[in-house]
Image (cartoon, rainbow, N blue to C red):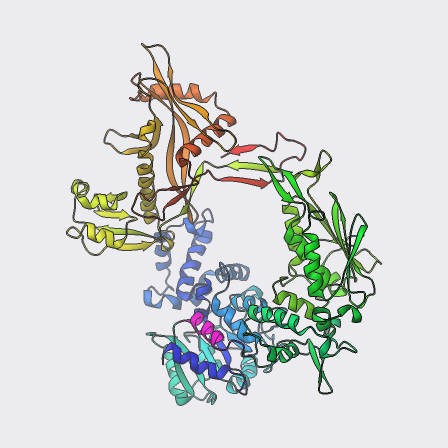
Amino acid sequence: MSHKNTIALLESLLRPEQEAPPTFLLGAGASYSSGVPLAAESVNRLARQYYAERVAGGGMTPDKIKTSQWKSWLNQQDWFISDPDRLAENFPLIIHHLLSPEAYRRRLIVDLVEPPGEVSSGYKALAELVLRGLASTILTTNFDPCLPRALDAKRPHLAHVDEVNRQPGDFAEFSPYSRAQIVWLHGKAELYSDKNLAEETEALAPELVERMRPLIENTPLVVVGYRGAEKSITDSLLGSEDGPAFRRGIYWCHRKGETPHPRVQALADRLGRNFTWLEIDGFDELMTGLNKRLSGVQRYAVSAENDDPSYDDTVMEGAVWGDIDHSLALATLRDYSEKLEFGELTSDQLQRFMEDRGLLKRIDGALRPTRGAILLFGRDANRFFPHAMISVTVNGKDRRNIRGNLLTQYDELLQWLSGDRVNPSIKVKGARKHENRRSYHDRALTELAVNLLVHRDYEASAVSTVNVLPGSAIEFRNPGDASLSLRSEIEFDEEGAFRPVAEVTDLRNRSLCDVFFGISAMEQGGTGLVDADELTRKNGGVSRFAFPPGADTYIARLSPPSASAGSARIAKDLRPVGVYTVNMMMFSSMPTHVTCATLDLTHTDFWKTGGARAVEPCVFEPKSQRLWTFATQECVEDAFRDALNGEAEPIALADIGEDEDIQRKITWLLRRHVEVYLKGFEASGLLIERTPKGRPTKRAYFTALRGGNRAIKYDTPQKRGITRTLVKKRGDDSKGFFECEGFGYDVVRLSETWALRIKPFYMFLDKDGKTPLPGYVRTKLSTRRYKYDRNAAVNSDLGFFEQFLRGGQQAIDLGAGVTDDLILEGAFLSVETEETGLMDDDEAADHKRTA
């Protein structure tokens, strides 16, 4: 059965016409594309980390340990299975023999399964299926957080996710009728309950099996990304010879060409026609394909009835369907539906869609709008909520009342907040430059505007207010006190002030929050005030949030960067700032591959061939006869067709990892490209220094101009037509010499990126202006010269070389005709950063530094 046919079959099982949604069982293969390693790779990572920390004494990080060191040690362990094909079987062994005590085991396992970035598209698609009720219970043998993170991203639409067996005896939340449920078959690592040892994966807890069996026997079971090696699953849960018949079927997904594990094959043989093999291209491809095919299909209302509905979820007395602005509701909810992948919403589906979201309630056979529906889409919302308006003022004057439904108020409030009178542009002074900046960050104001609308207490008769104090502050006030749950999670001072905490929120009005999130006006998880606070501080201002005791009021106050010399239009950024210029130019673009080829040529013959010119710049190793170049595989094979020993091999730079040998080759090759580029400055007197055998020394310097001084004019952003004398004649004619500027250059790797490092120096030439003086003479003259250099001189040197090397361009093309993807940034790395160690009132402390 092909991948396409698999999707068609599983689509039929997921459709709401079926009696119950299928149960999913996920294994490690599901999380692989999220960056979580499989069992074999996990063995390597854990062994390497253990060796670095426990065998090598912790003096080096795991990435610094050579592969030969830890692999040699691992192969010496008598319990280790050295057969490469059975490497994955060492996973429980490595846990048993190396990872103790429990805290150490937990730390390594949790670090191991932490995804390096976002969860994969497959998990996101699975979460969409759960949100629409097409899937509900997901069993997993994994310990990684991919699944809960994907489901958590669907809040507040997915109100709660039940988690079962996080630790022994944890069955309180289990229900065969759960809307969204994760069953951790082998426990959770962060709770010290993970089952990894061989004896731990022999069988599941009888209580867990007893609860799971009725569920998996009465629903189709779809297995994805699981190889079936653990007896705890294939024997204990799914049953051995006398196990259940699974009359609703087990659908075991596998990649094309995979050999079934003997335990799974035995299960297939036992179940016969009740077991189906399904071929898939991968977990992500399967889930995204299913989600696409089932777009717009849902089993039941996404927002289920709540035993304790919020105020906006209750029916609005006296309101009827005619009080809803249908066009506004349809336009808004179409955006909502598109974002949440419910499919395209049409007008004939609008009422049912609103009912599913809890915005309409069926009372005595008729659909009645809720308070939330009237507040959001009411034709005349203020007829039902006369106090639901925002009073905006400037210095307490020029009052304007913003009325209408909340979507109308949202648009009008944002327009008012964006006006120059409310949010004027100011000139902010930084350490190196000033810039025009809005008094308040636009996004911070938007966050507070949304907060004002969705979190106010609409049962209170007071109105919301926004008051601007020009040059001083902007203040948002909302009726409503903090809930008991919010007060239990956030610390308040005696004046009721608090600092926002990420993921801590109180959804006073759930329907309002749901719709505003669905149209991308707000984010989930309590990040709004956190973002407003952070953006305000980054803008140079100050924020304050409070529920003053006894006031039943919420206050948010933002202050702009403080005024400079009393000017409301010029502000000084009071954040302590240090500006660092690093003597490195970063490679902003790199080719995706480097080509390696073995040639039947000597070093001399290689450089005599025309093929060398076709792939130059390149590196050719005489001993191994290997060529390294950024030229394509086809180009290399065409250039050396008669000398090629085997095929040229393209190596992806993303795959070189910690291979120090290949990294070294890449460094040499990049340096060759730099030298070809520098050769283009010979007309300006720049000369690459070479050894007597003609090899570059990684240094370049300027030579005399026709036996005299050499000067160059260049421009900087601050000044044009600067004259810099690069070569100066010193002494009289008989003992004269030339003092010349130059720089050392080298290519270095910084984590996953590469950089060109430049280090200025002085070269001293004989009176002909070309021949370097003897080394001991240059050393003596250099020592004498360097004592006059200060930070300003070094900054000047870097500033000049930056302008000189970039040649008036913002980016430097180093491809030399071999590749179009090798680009060097035309500026040294420079960072303006806030520093706690600098004094606000000490200008001397806030200075430029050069590293």
User: Which one is in front, 220 or 293?
Assistant: 293
Image height check: is 649 above or below 483? above
Image height check: is 91 above or below 217? above
Question: Which residue is found at the position 45% from the left and 63% from the top?
Answer: 97
User: Which one is in front, 29 or 406?
Assistant: 406
Can residue 747 be seen here? The reply is yes
Residue 790 included in the magenta stretch of the image: no
Span shown in magenta: 282-296
Q: Position of residue 264 (x, y in %)?
A: 39, 80
Please tell me whether the stretch drawn in magenta is mainly helix, strand or loop.
helix
Image height check: is 313 above or below 767? below
Looking at the image, residue 517 sits to the left or right of residue 72; the answer is right
Looking at the image, residue 717 sits to the left or right of residue 543; the answer is left
**Residue at the right extreme of this rendering:** 550
User: Which one is in front, 340 or 652?
Assistant: 340
Can residue 506 be seen here? The reply is no
**Which image quarter is the N terminus in?**
bottom left
Q: Quadrant of residue 749?
A: top left
Looking at the image, residue 517 sits to the left or right of residue 808; the answer is right
Q: Position of residue 703 (x, y in %)?
A: 33, 24
Q: Quadrant of residue 327?
A: bottom right
Q: Position of residue 797 (x, y in %)?
A: 45, 28
Q: Position of residue 315 (x, y in %)?
A: 75, 77
Looking at the image, residue 78 sits to the left or right of residue 200; the answer is left
Q: Quadrant of residue 82?
A: bottom left
User: Which one is in front, 255 or 72?
Assistant: 255
So how many labels did they put on this image? 0
